[in-house]
């Protein structure tokens, strides 16, 4: 294939060239087993080995660019360390534990049962008869943990409120109907998707040791044994306990719903309330007659039980839907059905998990009910209408404490001051008017009626002024908790934060309230139901336990998190993380060893498996399912064997040969601790923090993780990835469309921080062009090698280019070490190419230096190798004819960069640009004579002579300003003394005797501001009286370049202080008076040859 193909708009020749190069390189790597990692005979020293890993992706779909983006951070880093000569281990595995696969398989089976095989689904308009899949499935091709990208609904779905059927999702993978039907069996997912993911990652060029790959669940008996050991060891250490705890729960699945079991609501926790029992005082109105003989309560959820002393009423939503639900044989709670369902899973329903509604009620039915409420100073309060109640939070019944709640104060004021509002809802005056605000808490700055004061201060007009009310609560609630003091009740004089738990305990102890929990926000399970909070008796890992938490904090302190934002995320999570439900009864996974009715949930079997990578190949013999004949049987992997390998335990009594046991231990000891784990930022709040905890508990401290690097999610072309809009690419699609190297190039360019990054198709297409053009240019250079200038670099342009190469090596090295790959791409490719292009232009008739171009090609190839390894391998082996592999070629050696030479060249290039603009302006001005003026100059008068005047030293008032700034600059802090001090120093200089100080100050200030900014950025050298290089020397050494670039015949460089030189300017000398040159700012004068040669 030609390496210089046509780049027509519809031609894929350039892309196809990269695909061919890609295929050749991967075949070469595979044959040579270049990525298989073997430990050394001795423990590695610093930098000798690199072990990095990545959260295994969930196998209910194909890998997409979101996965590839996070993974690329690890791949580029590992490739960089491999290039440097480190012994690199990059393994990869596939996660199948948990709910998503089982839920999807079950849905497929239900669809086949309902609609046939293949199914014939109802028309989109027929909403009522369709069983639909949940949000997560409509996006299943964008699968999974660790990075989730929710797709939008299709147009049909958007119109009808429907989502895709599971069968339709599977069709999106381009499967036949016959193949889709097989996915009713959860096991089929495990054999279908992991091999596809492996092939896609191989095509991506992932430098992976595939011998160490595995899938999770008990389908792999070796990994199953590892997880059973891990859980058993945690239990023996007292870190797994059985307890009654509130947890997010899926009624449909009949089990807790952890983060990765959720379609929406990842990270949402139970929110605990105190449920105040407000007893309805008989006789009951007709709507409640069916409840006679029962104790009936309006049940209000509150986060502020300490305020109950100040109740004046309670609130209901007039058009809200409520019910009277049986709690036990005697008690009935009136609340929303949603909250009743939560209560039913918290042992607060006569029939467990099935709320029984005795009477359906509207909010209007409750208005005017007389109530007896605990702690209230008012013996009777009434239920009143509030128009802003949200029934998706709490119970729909709201306590009213207008002394301390701005919402309550304004709603009560609306009823007091608006008779028409009372009349509209049938509110009697005696239910409202006699009730005054009751002071209960004194808050500094707000007094004992904080709500009233803040509402008046903010000029809030009504209960509908939502923004101002939100601000009022922001101003008072936290301050009330931290600084407020109780002024009533038995805890009078106590601070609110002390009294709050005591009052809560009092209410619960007296039976006046119960605890109630619900999800902080809406949570949908992957099975499609809305989750509740359940009080479950199950197994928990005791994250948050004091001593264990201290070890986890110490582990984090010694880790490299690569950004302050990542570290803050971990610190925040360690602050709140508490017991975690680790058992499930439904899904795929490993059975809990001591209680086999339960499975280990999906976030608890994936916290220590990085250690398993070190020995997986020895156990599984290269088969990801653990099905190959092996020297070890799964049943031989006793707890004692695992302890010996991973925990410095004693040699076990085992049928496994001592040599093999020793080999397993040696592998682990060599590779651990891992150097980095790369992940999306969403896993900080669970998986990554769990991993810290488990390593701190189970492994010796010298094997704790060294680094976690987190990134944001990936957008495509500045928009969220969405399959329905077409703004989506699987990894395979991207490779086929752009090639692996162009895809990797665009991933590196997408961004490196915690903010969401942006994969731009235009960048990938531009990479195709850049890489193939570079190949063509190198072919041209190699073909013309004999005509290039020989010998060592000798010209100014040679030295500048050599220096730019050295700078690129050093800057790119820094970026790779920091895992900042966009910066590495900039310095190691973009900037280096600009330097090469500038060198080509600068060389002129002397031509480019052969050795220097050879060094450039070698260095550029090495610097781009981690990002574009296939391209680099092609250049290295096929074009440069080098021995060995580019991916192991070693980091280029470079001399210390010369910053002065770089500054000098920038000065030269900037000066040429400015002089060209000035020349063009003069020429265009001479070609456009004004009306009645002389005709344009003849050819003899063409501007062909340039006189460049230089002043290498600041003088006059600029010199004085710089001396003042020098004496008032803190070099360490890069900061200046106060302006008043600098102004005083200027006043004391001789410049104030030259003219009125204010006029001089007006002249000085812009220069001073400029120099101060420059000094803050680059340091004290910005305040020097001259540049660090000789300007005249630089310009004179490059006269030929200046002449060629400006199209001049003759150029002279002169000192602005040389009288004879100034005389050469002739009639243009006034330019030097009006615009005198200064350091870094030469002044050029252009004239015709005739004028220049004319006698003065």
Image (cartoon, rainbow, N blue to C red):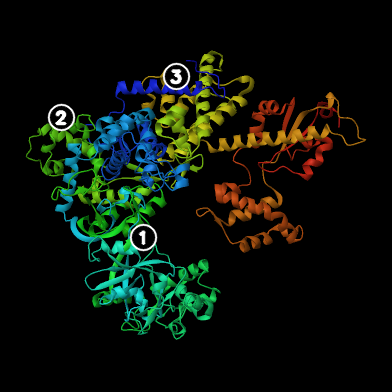
Q: Position of residue 647 (x, y in %)?
A: 17, 45
Viewer-nearest residue: 895 or 73: 73
The tag on residue 520 is: 1
Q: Residue at x 46, y 22 (%)?
A: 16
Which residue is under mark 2? 630
Give neighbour class at mark 1: few <14, some 14-19, many 20+ (Cα, 10 Å): some
What numbered label is drawn on residue 880? 3
Q: In terms of sequence position, does the residue under pointer 2 or pointer 3 come before the other?
A: 2
Q: At numbered mark 3, what does the secondary structure look like: helix, strand or loop?
A: loop
Q: Nearer the viewer, mark 1 or mark 3?
A: 1
Q: Nearer the viewer, mark 2 or mark 3?
A: 2
Tag 2 near tag 3, CB within 8 Å: no
Image side of residue 735 versus residue 528, left or right: right
Q: Is residue 32 left or right of residue 411?
A: left
- Alpha carbon of mark 2 to alpha carbon of mark 3: how far? 44 Å
Q: Residues within 10 Å of mark 3 (few under 14, many from 20)?
A: some
- At mark 2, the secondary structure is loop
Q: Please tell me which residue lies in front, 470 or 30.
A: 470
In primary-sequence order, the first of circles 1 and 3 is 1
Q: Quadrant of the C terminus?
A: top right
Q: Is residue 41 above or below residue 854?
A: below
Cα distance between the residues tagged 1 and 2: 49 Å
Mark 2 surroundings: few (<14), some (14-19) or many (≥20) residues within 10 A: some
- Seen in the picture, residue 847 relative to 608 is either above or below; the reply is above
Check if mark 1's residue and mark 2's residue have beta carbons within 8 Å: no
On the image, the x and y values in percent for residue 983 come to 65, 61
Which badge, 1 or 2, comes first in the chain's sequence? Answer: 1
Please give the name of the residue rendered at 44% of the width and 21% of the height, measured from the top-left corner.
875
- Rendered position, 759 above or below 281: above
């Amino acid at each position: 294939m030609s390496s210089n193909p046509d780049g027509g708009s519809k031609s894929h020749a350039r892309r196809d060239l990269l695909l061919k190069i890609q295929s050749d390189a991967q075949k070469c790597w595979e044959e040579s087993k270049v990525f298989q990692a073997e430990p050394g005979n001795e423990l590695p020293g610093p930098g000798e080995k690199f072990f990095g890993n990545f959260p295994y992706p969930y196998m209910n779909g194909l890998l997409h660019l979101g996965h590839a983006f996070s993974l690329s951070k690890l791949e580029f880093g590992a490739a960089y360390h491999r290039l440097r000569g480190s012994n690199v281990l990059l393994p990869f595995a596939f996660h199948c534990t948990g709910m998503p696969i089982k839920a999807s398989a079950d849905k497929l089976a239900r669809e086949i049962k309902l609609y046939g095989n293949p199914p014939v689904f109802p028309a989109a308009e027929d909403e009522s008869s369709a069983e639909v899949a949940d949000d997560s499935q409509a996006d299943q091709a964008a699968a999974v943990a660790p990075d989730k990208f929710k797709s939008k609904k299709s147009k049909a779905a958007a119109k009808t409120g429907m989502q895709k059927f599971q069968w339709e999702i599977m069709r999106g993978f381009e499967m036949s109907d016959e193949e889709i039907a097989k996915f009713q069996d959860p096991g089929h997912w495990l054999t279908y998707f992991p091999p596809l993911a492996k092939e896609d990652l191989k095509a991506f060029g992932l430098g992976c040791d595939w011998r160490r790959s595995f899938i999770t669940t008990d389908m792999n008996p070796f990994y199953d044994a590892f997880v059973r050991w891990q859980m058993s060891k945690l239990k023996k250490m007292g870190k797994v306990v059985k307890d009654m705890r509130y947890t997010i729960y899926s009624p449909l699945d009949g089990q807790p719903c952890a983060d990765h079991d959720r379609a929406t609501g990842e990270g949402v926790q139970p929110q605990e309330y105190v449920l105040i029992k407000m007893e309805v005082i008989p006789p009951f109105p007709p709507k409640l007659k069916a409840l006679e003989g029962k104790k009936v309560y309006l049940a209000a959820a509150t986060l502020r039980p300490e305020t109950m002393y100040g109740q004046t009423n309670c609130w209901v939503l007039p058009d809200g839907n409520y019910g009277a639900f049986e709690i036990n044989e005697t008690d009935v709670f009136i609340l929303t059905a949603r909250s009743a369902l939560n209560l039913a899973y918290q042992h607060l329903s006569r029939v467990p998990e099935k709320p029984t509604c005795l009477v359906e009620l509207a909010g209007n039915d409750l208005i005017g009910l007389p109530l007896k409420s605990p702690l209230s100073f008012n013996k009777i309060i009434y239920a009143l209408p509030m128009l802003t109640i949200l029934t998706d939070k709490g119970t729909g019944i709201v306590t009213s404490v207008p002394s301390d709640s701005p919402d309550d104060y304004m709603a009560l004021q609306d009823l007091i001051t608006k008779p028409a509002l009372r009349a509209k809802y049938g509110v009697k005056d005696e239910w409202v008017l006699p009730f005054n605000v009751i002071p209960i808490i004194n808050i500094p700055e707000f007094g004992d009626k904080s709500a009233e004061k803040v509402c008046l201060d903010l000029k809030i007009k009504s209960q509908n002024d939502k923004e101002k009310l939100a601000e009022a609560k922001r101003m008072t609630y936290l301050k009330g908790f931290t600084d407020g003091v109780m002024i009533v009740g038995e805890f009078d004089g106590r601070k609110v934060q002390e009294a709050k738990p005591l009052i809560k305990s009092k209410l619960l102890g007296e039976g006046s309230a119960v605890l109630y929990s619900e999800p902080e926000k809406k949570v949908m399970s992957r099975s499609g139901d809305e989750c509740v909070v359940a009080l479950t008796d199950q197994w928990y890992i005791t994250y948050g336990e004091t001593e264990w938490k201290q070890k986890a904090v110490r582990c984090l302190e010694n880790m490299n998190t690569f950004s302050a934002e990542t570290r803050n995320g971990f610190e925040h999570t360690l602050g709140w993380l508490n017991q975690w439900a680790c058992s499930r009864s439904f899904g795929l996974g490993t059975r809990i060893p001591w209680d086999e009715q339960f499975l280990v949930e999906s976030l608890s079997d994936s916290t220590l498996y990085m250690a398993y990578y070190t020995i997986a190949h020895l156990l599984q013999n290269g088969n990801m399912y653990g099905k190959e004949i092996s020297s070890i049987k799964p049943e031989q992997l006793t707890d004692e064997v695992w302890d010996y390998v991973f925990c410095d335990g004693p040699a076990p009594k085992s049928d496994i040969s001592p040599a093999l046991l020793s080999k397993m231990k040696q592998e682990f000891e060599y590779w651990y601790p891992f150097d980095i784990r790369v992940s999306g930022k969403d896993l900080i709040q669970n998986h990554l923090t769990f991993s810290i905890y488990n390593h701190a508990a189970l492994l010796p401290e010298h094997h704790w993780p060294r680094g976690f690097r987190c990134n944001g999610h990936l957008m495509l072309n500045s928009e969220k990835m969405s399959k329905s809009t077409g703004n989506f690419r699987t990894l395979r699609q991207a490779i086929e469309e752009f090639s692996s190297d162009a895809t990797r190039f665009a991933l590196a360019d997408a961004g490196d921080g915690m903010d969401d990054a942006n994969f731009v198709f235009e960048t990938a297409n531009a990479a195709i062009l850049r890489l193939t053009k570079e190949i063509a240019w190198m072919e041209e250079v190699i073909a013309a090698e004999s005509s290039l200038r020989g010998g060592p670099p000798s010209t100014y342009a040679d030295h500048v280019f050599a220096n730019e190469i050295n700078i690129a090596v050093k800057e790119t090295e820094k970026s790779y070490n920091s895992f900042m790959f966009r910066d590495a791409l900039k310095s190691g490719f973009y900037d280096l190419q600009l330097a090469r292009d500038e060198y080509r232009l600068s060389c002129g008739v002397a031509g480019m230096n052969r050795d220097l171009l050879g060094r450039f090609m070698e260095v550029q190839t090495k610097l781009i190798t981690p990002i574009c390894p296939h391209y680099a391998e092609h250049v290295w082996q096929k074009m440069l004819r080098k021995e060995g592999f580019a991916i192991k070629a070693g980091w280029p050696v470079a001399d210390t960069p010369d910053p002065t030479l770089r500054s000098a060249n920038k000065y030269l290039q900037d000066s040429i640009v400015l002089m060209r603009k000035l020349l063009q302006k003069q020429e265009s001005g001479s070609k456009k004579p004004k009306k009645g003026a002389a005709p344009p100059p003849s050819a003899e008068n063409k501007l062909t002579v340039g006189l460049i005047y230089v002043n290498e030293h600041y003088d006059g008032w600029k010199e004085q300003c710089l001396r003042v700034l020098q004496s008032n600059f803190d070099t360490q802090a890069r900061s200046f003394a106060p302006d008043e001090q600098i102004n005083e120093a200027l006043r004391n200089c001789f410049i104030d005797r030259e003219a009125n100080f204010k006029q001089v100050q007006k002249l000085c200030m812009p220069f001073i501001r400029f120099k101060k900014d420059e000094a803050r950025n680059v340091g004290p050298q910005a305040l020097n009286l001259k540049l660090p290089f000789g300007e005249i020397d630089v310009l004179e050494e490059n006269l030929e370049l200046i002449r060629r670039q400006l199209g001049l015949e003759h150029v002279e460089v002169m000192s602005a202080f040389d009288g004879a030189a100034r005389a050469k300017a002739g009639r243009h000398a006034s330019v030097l008076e009006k615009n005198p040159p200064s350091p870094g700012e030469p002044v050029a004068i252009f004239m015709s040859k005739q004028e220049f040669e004319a006698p003065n």
